[in-house]
Structure formats: structure tokens, C-alpha cells
Image (spheres, coloured by chain):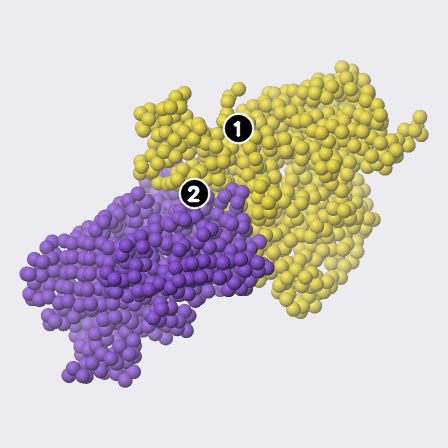
Chain colours: A yellow, B purple
Amino acid sequence: MKEYSVIGKPYPQRGSVQKATGRAKYIEDIYLPGMLYGKILRSPYAHAKIINIDTSEAEKLPGVMAVITGADIPKVQSEFLGPLGGADRYALAVGKVRFVGEEVATVAADDEDTAEEALELIQVEYEELPEVFDPEEAMKPDAPIIHERVGNNIAYEIHHSAGDIEKGFAEADYIREDRFETPMVQAAFIGPRGAVADYDPVIKKLTLYTEATMPFTSRGPLAQVLDMPVSNIRVIRPYIGGGFGEKSRVTIDVCFCASFLSMHLGRPVKIMHTRAEEFLTCAGRQPVVTYLKTGVMKDGTLVARQLTRISNTGASVGGSESYAKQDVGIFELLFRCPNTKFDSYSVYTNLTPSGTLRSLTNNALSFGIHSHMDMLARDLGVNVADFYLKNAHQQGDITHAQYKLDSCGLSECIQKVIEASKFKERQGKLGKGRGLGFATAGHTCGYKHRDWLPDLSTAEVLIDRDGNVRLLSGRAESGMGPGTMQIMCVAEELGIPPDDVDINEFVDTDITPFESGNYASRGTIQQGNAAMAAARNVRVQLFEVAAPALSTTPDNLEAKDSRIFIKGSPERGISFKEAVKAYEAAGKVLPLIGRGSYNPPTIAWNEHGEGNNSIAYGFGAQVIEVEVDNETGKVEVVDVVSAMDCGKVINPLILDGESEGAINMGIGMALLEQISYDEKGRMLGTSYTDYRLPTVWEQPSVKTMWVETIDPYGPYGAKGITETVGIPTALAIANAVYDAVGVRIRKLPITPDKILDGLREKETSK
Amino acid sequence: MKEYSVIGKPYPQRGSVQKATGRAKYIEDIYLPGMLYGKILRSPYAHAKIINIDTSEAEKLPGVMAVITGADIPKVQSEFLGPLGGADRYALAVGKVRFVGEEVATVAADDEDTAEEALELIQVEYEELPEVFDPEEAMKPDAPIIHERVGNNIAYEIHHSAGDIEKGFAEADYIREDRFETPMVQAAFIGPRGAVADYDPVIKKLTLYTEATMPFTSRGPLAQVLDMPVSNIRVIRPYIGGGFGEKSRVTIDVCFCASFLSMHLGRPVKIMHTRAEEFLTCAGRQPVVTYLKTGVMKDGTLVARQLTRISNTGASVGGSESYAKQDVGIFELLFRCPNTKFDSYSVYTNLTPSGTLRSLTNNALSFGIHSHMDMLARDLGVNVADFYLKNAHQQGDITHAQYKLDSCGLSECIQKVIEASKFKERQGKLGKGRGLGFATAGHTCGYKHRDWLPDLSTAEVLIDRDGNVRLLSGRAESGMGPGTMQIMCVAEELGIPPDDVDINEFVDTDITPFESGNYASRGTIQQGNAAMAAARNVRVQLFEVAAPALSTTPDNLEAKDSRIFIKGSPERGISFKEAVKAYEAAGKVLPLIGRGSYNPPTIAWNEHGEGNNSIAYGFGAQVIEVEVDNETGKVEVVDVVSAMDCGKVINPLILDGESEGAINMGIGMALLEQISYDEKGRMLGTSYTDYRLPTVWEQPSVKTMWVETIDPYGPYGAKGITETVGIPTALAIANAVYDAVGVRIRKLPITPDKILDGLREKETSK
């Protein structure tokens, strides 16, 4: 395997010390002269007509500068990428409200307290309407209609099939059917969302400081809703306190309301979510109900797989199309099977519009699949790992959904975890409330939204007169360290230490190079390739001036140890800085600039969710040991053995951190996290006191093994796996709980009461 | 003459509405979280030993975070471009103080009041030393020595000669000798200087928000004094409230002190000058004494010209080398003369270190030259304009100082103003206290500091997916509108309206392209050429994709009216936006980026001030009519007729504004501005109440005619004339005063008391 100087070696994430020492600037830290503070009035009803809004008293309050309602804004609904998603929502409610917390009016005032006081003075007259909260209820013909224009509550549906599902089931030796369910959860990032909008009425330009992980592409939906040209919007993105995909939705209430207020007043306006607003407005991953039916031969060969997916989009369709389409491919990503059928219904209810949270709905869907497969294996009397290995996709396979697996370490990951955990020897034999669970994962590394939309990363590497190397990147950091990864690629290509490479902290769409964004684990492949290309472009230019000085040709040179020298002869060379001087001496203009870009040859999904939408796919497997307390029903995760196909390890320090963090989140999904509502659709608990997250105390011992399949498209063979690493955790925990105490949990989270109920039921049925 | 779509047409300056409406962000408007406020303790003595500094009481004051004195900072003196100039000054005084206001200590505290209070608690023990304030006194052997290391008070001297000066005088029919003097004045910009320094101790990087008009190159001296690598300094430059060359000196007390404090504390620190500190620390243009001796033939031909220049640098040499070297060339720029001699002494005194103010010391030197020439003409009985025309340099001339006049409209400017003002017919004949004065100007358009330093402008033009055109420029706006000029160049080259071109507001050395800076009227030629080149680079790329679509070759295309079409056939084309789409459709990466740069073939001055240091030279002439009140001695400027060789008019709106503003400043120089000191070197008056500036009430009727000589190096033939336009004003006023009342003022400003003294003297000598 090729020897690298930088790639594969641990290197601390750039910016982490800034975060730890309080130097990093977040949206809260943005202060502009003359800045006003905004607040948002929200609906107390889950479903109600707005009869009248009287803002006159609020407007009279000293210090209040503007009150804006749905009547005052352009009636434009975003069509793409927005929270407004499929054009079913205005930035401020018009005519009716559809969930508790929906935005009804917004106020700008000299300070936050005045703005808050003004909200209380706004008189809104509502007429309550019947509500529906359960998606399967909402699909019934007599359910209250949430969006009249749609006519029913199906926000989005998609159907895909391959082979002949009926024939498959007919041929099967054994068929099993199950239903599973995941709850509404919250991304619960530590940094609440906020925005500072600064509209310049002279040049009609809006500068928006916000936390978008898609700063460039989010200008599109912003422009639609604000009814202004994309080029009149500048997004500046400071540090953010966590994103998990949910912050790719720049187009949320704070951005719109701050922008409308700033555009109205010609002054900067800041709006920050309170923690309660974070919960009320952004509920995180869609709850998913999965109906599974699988036909299998006696030897464990899958012959027919059917899945019906019903997801609760809440009051707005949001990104449901993306989530559902991705799940088509995810459904088929792990297993070969000739006959498949997938049907998905994203359903409107009167709950908070749901979004995404690290892997979209993959882990919700996969919870069903992996529980079901575990039960099937037990039914067949085969070891579940062998069952997986028998049916696992292999490198070179093309799935029915047209996913091309140019690299695929699924089987290797499975073998590694079952060997390391002695899974086969130990499963079912631990006793004392202990059990072992197994699960796998497959996920995309980026995705192409639309055929007409470039899925593009670009980077610039600049070398100044003193040899200083700067990387300009539009990547949006939210914890995974894409900038650090880019720095390492540049350092590797230029043969210099990564410490010698600077990178811009903030992203500024008016200045930093274009970048589609950080979502769908696309950073590593796309941004890594772009940075490599930019560095190589620089290297070519340096080699061209160094070659004559070394009496050789550029193709005979290499760059390493901060030197440029004749291949294989480090002594016959010049230093990197001397090469920069030679570049200048050759009459060329400094800074030397190299540009690189990467736009992968991927295909947007068709109407059936088919198409090689990601340039590569990450895979992994985990075996997890739990201990279940028979008395209290409490589940403790004792040990996690994980193996992940990351293509190639670029930075083990960050990868291990990613894995540990993702497993922690998986434990939260398995055991703790859910949002509950009362009978009127009001959220029960909107703080970290009520919404329990796993902490370091819940963290088990974790061993992560990295499988290097060297993907042909990835930089140095690497793939993005920030989502993949955490997917198996909740799934394996559920299976481990069954292994420990024989209780099968069909709806997450695995709370003590469910365990105790299950134990009681087992006792009764004996 | 070539027809342009944009060039030559009035276009409002970008950013001016922001300034007028209060939206523009200045250094005062920069707030960073956790920011502290700094203040600077200054010497009350003009010359004194520092015996002891006791900061203990100040440090104890609650809210004080740090107190720093000269003992705490690296003992590094900047060698180049700094206020520290020729390595004769530390950022905080060490050992002794040399002027009233010199920086002795700096304090950072939670707020400005606390910092101010802390200054009062610092105990400094001084031992007074004898002072000297007059440069000619300071040159005497027994004068107090200000810089012991130098040994005398000559900070910088330079000598240049051509031909044989003795022979010239021997041949002359007539010889005249005179002495003239200009006072210390202040740039007096409306925006006081300030800095916000934000040092990150983790990555050892300093971000400095300040008003530098040389944001990139000022990092060099900053790095020297702060003892850190250039690449660890990032300069961000917001709007500034006037510069006039004085803000090219980024390395002033606020920058250094804020940086030291921030580096010491690891927190952002802001220091703003009070208006008094503006006066105390930055006295503006060097006072200059000129001794002139000129030999002339009966027919008015100059045969020998000798000038001795003595300038008062104050307590630090500052940029004296530049000012004196430029004056070598300026001395010879207007007139042909075979024998010349120039000797200059920049002399230390115990006054505020003097700097520069629009044209360096050109107008101080030229005041002497033009008064002297006016007197010579009167002695010879020839009209002064004819006298000038007889000796004027012409296009193609190379001066003794090696200035190459590739374009030169001096004679044409003279002819235009004497015709328009009927100068010859009216001079000396107006009566009623009215008089007409004539003067000219020649100045550089940029200059090359050092042979090893690139004199470089670069620009990037980016085209986004929606066809939006963005110009990234490192130009530092301070009123002359270089960005607007660049926008017009880009619009012209791309055939689009200037409104369609965006430009970055702030300069950020980590992000915007390299730029040597805005000084010495270099913006138009260098930044204009860079912008043109970047736009042409974009155009080439667009033509390459448009040509196949139009079944032609790129060289057969032109861009105009937002279209790209076959030359001469506007109907056979596509829109600009369609071309951008074609570029993307051709599989090329957006944004489309074009880069351009300009680094002129100029030569740094040698030790005699010789070398073609500027790529072009601006010229002009003015005739001014004044009315002098015999009773009060008050001078009123009635009318100004100006003609300026700007090469080519790019934007008449800005040019006319430049001319009017510069003439207003010239009136200030002529009639109002001077800084006075008491016998202990303490400034008398440090506010706008004491220091009188001309206002709109002093503004006469101004007619400016533009002479287009189409310089071969300038963009579209244009030259920078922001300094040239104001030079003749004070000179012509002095000559007009003589024409009106027969009083010759040999030291500016022309105050009523000097007029009355002159009238009295005239009366007496009758």
C-alpha cells in the first residue's frame, strides 16, 4: 500500500482548540452596529384558522420598530431544499396554522425583552380545527385535511420494485412479517439556531449571518421566499454548535423573519432561538413506521423483500422526498435479493414539521430491517451474522436502485466484528441479563439533488510571497472536520506539514469558493478531491519553475519534507520556499493560485428513487453487548465492537472521534430520545431536562476497526462515513436486548417500562 | 477616438450611498465578543529621559486587564514603510521621549473610562532634556541631539545634480534667489484612526481590523515590530473616513498597542484615537523650507535651477526618504533645464513626527517653485504662463531624474486655463483688491518602493451560475473610488452595465486578492489594468464556449449590451447569461473565474532619487482669482479654472468631485491650515475648533477641464490624478494674492495678519 506522509496519521482537528477555549465565534457572537433584536410569535394550536391578527398594541410599545405578519410578506413558498419543502408553507402563517409553534408574527425591537413583551400584545383570534397526529390515522379517508390544496394527507409517496415480488414470496420456504416504529426525535445540538440579517436597501443586498451547512445553495430557497435575486444574497457562516444535517436547512424561521424585518427596516436584525423554540420548531428525524415482509429459502437465501414505509412529516413535507427516495436505495443496499418491493408514504399530521438527523431516515428504516432480520435468523435457526454474510452485497454489485458498489467492505466488516467480539461463540450464552446484538449499516457518501444542479466542491490553494500556504474553502464545518481533511490533502500533495496550511474560518458566499455544502457525508470525497486538485494544480506550477533550476523536467520531480527534488534523490532539490521564490523570479504573479473542483459523475434519483445518486457507499457492522436489569428494566450498553469501511483512513484521530460520538448518539436513539405530545399536539417538555440525551456516563467501551477498501473515486480511496458509523448502534442494541432478556422492542426508544412490560408479558404467556 | 459603453460616462461611486445613509461600517463599528478597550499614555515632554515607570497602581484598578510599557515589548524597530521608518522608534518609548504625545504605556480595560482612569495612575518619572523645534536650528552643530545613534539631527539627506550648475549660473543672463516655507499641517480626516486587534494564542495568529490603505504590505512592518511571521497577520479593512495618504501608515500606535495588548491577553482589544490624539500623533505633511536659485536667459529660457530642501521630520524619520526622493523628480518634472542641482535634508526636531498628505511634499516644494517662478517672470517682464510654456516638458521627454514622459499634457493644460480665464488679458488689471494667479502641477501615478518589492495589483472576476458578476479586489477605498473605477473597467470589457458588477466592500488579506495598496495615485493605472485583465480573462473563457454555439471563432466575437455576438452583427449572438449557461453546459466548473494582475515596468529610485519610478505622470494647471480685503487682510477665492491631464476620463462624476475636493484642500493649505506649538513643543489646539479647515462656504466656483493624452500604459489611456488635481491651488492663490495687492507671502498659510503686515510694509517702503 502506498506510503503517505500525512494521510493516515492522526492530526488534531483545526478549530477544536478555538472551540474549547471559547475563541470560536458563533452566531450569538455577531454584533452589528444599530442591530435590533427579533422575536417570533407562535401558534398555541395544532390546527386552527386565523380569523384576525391585531398588531396595533404591539406597534405602540416604545422600542418596537416593526411587527410583521403573514399578510405583510411575499406569498412565495420555496420549492426546493427549504423547510418549506414542497411549497406547502409560508414563512409566516397565512390563513391557518398547522402545528403548535408555527410562526404567526415577528417583531423587531431595540432589545429582546421589548420584543418579547410586544409578542404578548399581539392579539390573534383563532378558530380551532380538528387535529390529527398519527400518520396512519391521517391516511384514513375521514381524517381532517391539513393542506386543502393537496386534498388528502399524503405529502409524498414513492414506489419501487424489482423482479416479481409475488413470485418471490411464492417460491420462498419461509415468510415473516413485522411492524416497527421510531419516534419523533430532536437533533438537540448544543448551539441553538439564530440569524443576523443585514439588508442594505441601497444596493438591495441582504447579508445573512447564519449557521447553514449549505451556505451557497441555501441562497436559492432564500431568494424565492424573500422574492429577490440569488446574487443579492450573501451568506456568512461562523462556527456552529453542531448540525447533524438539520442545519443544512438554512431556510428556517430565524433566517426568514430576521430577513423580512431587516428588509423592512433597513437595519440589522438578530433572532436567536430559545432552547424551547429549538424543540418547538425543529423536531429532527421523521418518525417512521415500517411494515416488513420477507421470503427466504431454507438455506437463508433471501428471495423476496417487501417494505412499506409510513413516515410522519408533521405539518410540512420538508425534505420528505429526499428521505423517502434515499430509503429506496438503503432498503436494497445491504442484501442481494432478486425480488423487492418498496412503497413509501410521507404523511401530513398536525405535529412539528419533521426533518433529518444524521443519515436522514436510514437508521429509522434500518431499525425495522435489522430487528426483522434478527427475528428471521432466529426463526431459521441460523446465526444472524452468517445470514447477513450469505446475502451481503459485494464489490462490483449494482443494486436494483442502481447503486454502483465500486467498493464494498460489508462482508469484511461483518467478519471483523464477529471475530473480535466472538459473537458466534458468545451470543445467547452470556446470561445474567447480558446479551449480544448484531447490526450493519450501508449509507451514501453524498447525493445529487437534481440533474440540473451541480453537486460541486471547489477549493483554492494560494501561496504567498513568504511561502505561506492558504486554503480557501467553502466547506461548512459542523464537527466532522472537513477543513482539517482538506488541509491534510493539500499538505500531502505539496509535501509540507499540515501545520503549514492555513484555512479560512468563516464561509462567505461573496468571497470563498463555491461549495454545494456539507450534508449526506459528502465532504470527504468531494471536498477532499477538490482540495487535492487545487494542491496538484499548485504543484504543477511550482514544478514548472523548479524543473529548470534542477536541470530536469517537471514530471521527474516530487514534493516531500517541504522540499521539491528529483524523484528518489532528496538531496538534488530545493526547498518549498525556494521554489516559491523561483516562481516569483520567473516573473509570475504571486500569490500563486491553484484551483480545484470535483463534481462526481452521479445521477439524480428518478421518480422511483432509482439512480446512482452517490459516488460511493460506506458500510459497517457492529456487535454490541448490553446488560438489562430485570428489576428496573434499565439497559446498560457495556461494549461496542465496530468495523467500518471508510475506504481509506485519512485521519484516525477524527475518525475514532466520529465513531465514538455517533455510537453515543445511537445509544440515545436506542434508549432515551423521543419527543412526546399531549392530546392537543403540544410538546411535552422543551428543554434538556425533559429531553434526555446520552452523556459520557452512558458511553460504553468502544473498539472501532477501520476497513480500507480504497474506493476508486475517493481521495486516496477514502469515503465519507460520518453517518454510517452510528447507524448500527440502536439496531444492535435492540437485538442485544432481545438476546439478553427475550424482549423484542418494536418501537424505540427501549425505555425501562417497555422492558418491564415485555418481561411481564413473557411471564404471562409462559 | 474609440467609443466606449461605460468608460467616460458618469457613474455614481459605489459605497457613497452607504456612507451617506450611515450604513457603511467603520472601525468604530467593529465589535467583537469579549472585546476590551485600550488607551495610550503619552509623554507631556518634548524631550526627556524616562527615569522610571511605575504601573503598579494602574494594574490594581478593578477592570484593568493589562498595562504594557516599552520594557514589555520586543525591541524591534520597523525598517520599511512604518511610522517607525528608518528604525528610529519603538512602538512604546524606551529610555527617552522625543515629542509631546509620544507613546509611553498602554492599558487594556473592560471599558474606555477605566482605561483612561488607569492612565492617570501610571507614575512616570522624567528628566527633561533641552529641545529643538526648528530644523535649521537643529542642523547647527551645538543643537541638542535627538537620536544619539545618528550623532546629529540629519535624519535623511539626498543629493542629485545634472549638467554643470556653476556653468549654468555663469551663463545665465539673470539669477534670482528666494526662500519659502510651509507649516506643519494635519490630514484632519473626519474618521479618526483606530484598531481592533484579535490575537488567537492557539494558532498564534493576529487579526487586525484597521484603516490601512496598504492592508497587504503593511503586514511586513507589523510583523517586524510584533516579532511574528507575516503570514500570521490578517488585516481586515472596513470603510474609512478619509485617508489622504496618511492612512497608508497602518503601523501607528493604535495598531501596535492594540496588538500587543491582545497578544498579551488573548482577547480582542479596541483602541480609538480621540480627536486630540489624532492631532498629537499624526501631524500630516512635513513642513518644508525651500531655498531656490534660478538662472535664466533674457528670452526666458531656464539654464540653471538649484533647490535646497530642508524638511522637518519631527522626532522620527518616518517616510522622509520617500518624500525627499520624490521631490528630486518633482523638482525637474515641469521644466526642461540643462543644469540642475537638488539637495535635501530631512531634519529631526522635537515635534510630532510628520507624515504625508496628498502628494507627499510635492505641494510644499511646489509652493516655493511656483512663487519663485512667478517672481522671476515678473522680474523678466514676461507673462508667467508664457514663461512656463517656453520651458515646459513635452511628451517623449526623459527628465534628468529619469522620469519618462510617455504622455504629457502640461502645455495643453496651461493653454486651456489661460484661454478659459483670459489670464493674459486680465492679470494685473482687475483692481478692487482682485488678482489672478497661475500655477501648474506634475505628479507621479504610483511609485515603486524597492526593486525587490512587487508593485502589484491583482483582481479576480467571478461569474456565478445565475450570471452574476463579482469582482474581488484588494483595493483600499478612501474616497477616490478605485473600486468603482474597477467595476467600470470590468463592465466595459464584458459589455455589461456597471450595475451588474458586484464588488467586495471590505478588504481581508486572508481572502481578497493581493494588492500593493492605494497610495501615490497608483489606483487608476494599476488597479484599472488588473481589473481589465481579469475581465478579459473571463471574456476569453466565455468567447471560447460562445464561439461554437455561434459557428464562429472566438476572435470573431464581441461583448456589448449584455450580449456576445459576431463582430458587427449584434443580432447574431447570445445573451451574456446564455453564454454563462453554455459555459456550464460545456462541463466547465462555475463560478467562472478570471484573474488579472498588473506590475508595471518601473524602476525604484537610486540613492540620488533617480529612476522611472512611476509608470506615468499626471499634469495640470490652474488660474485662480482672489479678492483681498485691504481692511481685514482676508482673502477670498472667487474663481478657479483648472485643466488636468488625466490621460483619459473614466468617470467624469468622480473626477469632478476629486477636483473640487482637492481644490478645497488647496484653499485650506493656502489660507487656513497650520499647527502651532508653544515654546515647550506642546501643540496649541488639538480640535477642529482650533484647527480651521475650509468648508463648503470657502468653496469658489470651479471649472475643471480634462485633457485626454491617452497614456500608453493606463487603462483606456487613463492616469491617476487624485494628487495632481489639488497641487496648483495654494500656489496659484499665493500668486493671485500678489497680483491683487502686491504682497508676496513666503510662508503659508496666507493669514490676514500676514497680508496686513505686508500691506503695512509696502506702505512704509513707499
Q: Residue at x 54, y 50 (%)?
A: B265
Asked if B241 appears above or below B509 in the picture, the reply is below
Quick check: B733 left or right of A747?
A: left
Q: Residue at x 67, y 33 (%)?
A: A660
Q: Amino acid at mark 1?
A: Ile
Element class at badge 2? loop
Same-chain status of marks 2 and 1: no
Q: Residue at x 54, y 42 (%)?
A: B202
Q: Nearer the viewer, residue B78 or B564?
A: B78
Element class at badge 1? loop
Quick check: A485 left or right of A56?
A: left
Marker disc for residue A7? 1
Q: Nearer the viewer, residue B442 or B127?
A: B127
**Would residue A447 be seen by someone viewing this image from the given angle?**
no
Gap in angstroms between the C-alphas marked 2 and 1: 27 Å
Q: Callout 2: few (<14), some (14-19), or many (20+) C-alpha neighbours within 10 Å?
A: some
Chain bearing mark 2? B
Q: Callout 1: few (<14), some (14-19), or many (20+) C-alpha neighbours within 10 Å?
A: many
Residue at the far top: name it.
A299
Q: Which residue is mark 2?
A: B229
